[in-house]
Image (cartoon, rainbow, N blue to C red):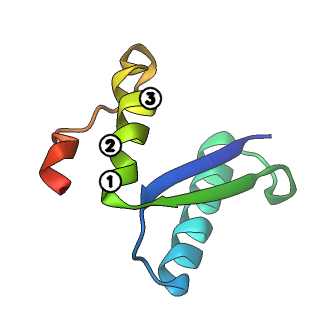
Amino acid sequence: MPHINIKLLEGRDKAQLEELSAAMTAAMQKVLGCDDKYISLSMEEYSKQEWQTVFAQEIHDKSATLVKAPGYDPKSLL
């Protein structure tokens, strides 16, 4: 463990997602000192409309657990 779950808007190509996965894995290894075999990562892509619900549930409703809050209104994406 750890497990990384990335939620993002759809539209990135496979190479970008693979590069992001490699960068996140490398950062976890460096900062936490854990071996690659213990790290798992998933990515969930959403439309701009679907993101409204994800934002409400994962960001707005869990603001007390955020370590970095976003600086945008999700409605600006529509």
Mark closest to the chain's N terminus, 3 or 1 = 1
Residue highlighted by disc 3: 57
Residue highlighted by disc 1: 49
As rendered, which of 58 and 78 lies closer to the eye?
Answer: 78
Residue type for callout 1: Gln
Q: How far apart are the two marked residues, 2 and 3, measured between alpha carbons?
A: 9 Å
Residue type for callout 3: Gln
The answer to whether 67 is drawn above or below residue 44 in the figure is above
Q: How far apart are the two marked residues, 1 and 2, measured between alpha carbons?
A: 6 Å
Nearer to us of marks 3 and 1 is 1
Q: Mark number for residue 52?
A: 2
Mark closest to the chain's N terminus, 2 or 3 = 2
Q: Given the current orientation, which residue lies at the most extreme left position?
A: 76
Q: Residue drawn 18% across and 56% down? A: 78
Q: Secondary structure at mark 2?
A: helix
**Picture coordinates of residue 3 (x, y %)?**
72, 44
Res 33 quadrant in image: top right
Residue type for callout 2: Gln
Q: Residue drawn 80% across and 40% down? A: 1
Left or right, residue 48 beside residue 45? left
